[in-house]
Image (cartoon, helix red, strand yellow):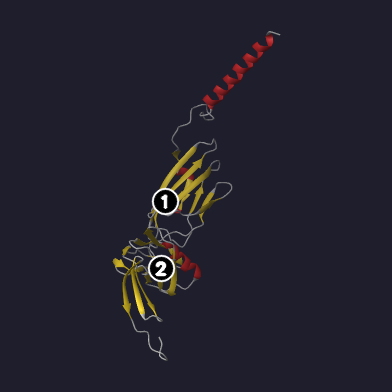
Amino acid sequence: MNDTPRIRTVLSCTLLALTVTAGATACAGSDGHPLSASPYDAADQITFAAADGARLDPEKPLEITSTDDDGRISDVTATDAAGRHLAGELTADGRTWRSTGSLAAGTRYTVRVATEDEDGAPGARTYTFETAPAKRALTVTFGPQAGTYGVGQPITADLTLPVKDRAARAVVERALKVRSTPAVEGSWYWVDDKKLHFRPKEYWPAGTLVSVTGNLDGLRVGDKLYGGPSKPLRLKIGDRIEAVADAETHYMTVRRNGEVINTIPVTTGKPGFST
């Protein structure tokens, strides 16, 4: 009866020893040598069309292929100079990564490729390349001019080229950013094919600071049509001035920020000739 506890104690120590041993050898390669903490240079395992410094056509997809029969690509991230990520898909066998999103025109990309060899050791390679500039550039001018405006003032956006396609219009709307302090909900509305207005859902609060920017530069808008650079705009919203005329009493009430500052007699016509 006294032997049982001793057997359990020995078994517990054995399991502990096995656990420690497994942890100690987890970082060793197939040849018994410890793997390096830093990924190896995977340049010889990858083919990349822009690796020779050529400018890529933004109308064509980006493709990266593994040339190692026993290795694979594990991950790819591609980011342009504006910080926009290029979407893509990796094949199930890890042999090829191909972009599914549109390349931006006239910009520099940084591509980081992660690989694994037959032993699972990580490799890495970073590439930079440029895309050819767009032949047609869509630019935007924001209005009104910088200054202080009333609480009902819309933001205007004038385009240099007409945009009629619904999908292309959605791209433009997403790229035009209106930020304010305090934050205000609002939307862009198309006045015609070349002009948009942004209006808040309610009036701008008095004292609001408004910032308008365009992220169209290099962005694919439509068939062979890309966005160009734009100048940002900053506005300030002044006091909320409201003038309400009453046709029955023939008086107009003027309020500033909700407080009545004046009551003025007005004419709104006469019987038979009412306004």
In the rendered structure, find residue 198 and report the number of the disc placed on it: 2
Q: What secondary structure is found at the residue carrying circle 1?
A: helix
Residue nearest the viewer, comparing 49 with 229:
229
Q: Which of the 4 quarters of the picture holds residue 199?
A: bottom left
Q: Secondary structure at mark 2?
A: strand
Depth check: 34 or 158 in front? 158
Establish if 189 lies above or below 108.
Answer: below
**Which sits in the foreground, 241 or 67?**
241
Q: What x and y, as percent, mark residue 37?
A: 45, 33
Q: Which-is-in-front pick, marks 1 and 2?
A: 2
Quadrant housing residue 235: bottom left
Earlier in the chain: of badge 1 and badge 2, it is 1
Outermost residue on the right side: it is: 1
Q: Residue furthest front?
A: 249
Q: Residue furthest top?
A: 2
Judged left or right of residue 255, residue 2 is right
Answer above or below: position of 4 versus 199. Answer: above
Say few, some or many: other residues with alpha carbon within 10 Å of mark 2 (under 14 / 14 to 19 / 20 or more).
Answer: some
Q: Quadrant of residue 150?
A: bottom left
Q: Which mark is residue 31?
A: none
* Residue type beneath disc 2: Phe
- Check whether the beta carbons of the residues at disc 1 and disc 2 lie within 8 A of each other: no
For the C terminus, the image quarter is bottom left
The amino acid beneath tag 1 is: Ala
Residue 108 x/y as whole percent: 38, 55
> Distance between the Cα atoms at labels 1 and 2?
43 Å
Q: Which residue is mark 1?
A: 51
Q: Estimate the x, y position of residue 195 in percent, counting from the top left.
A: 40, 73
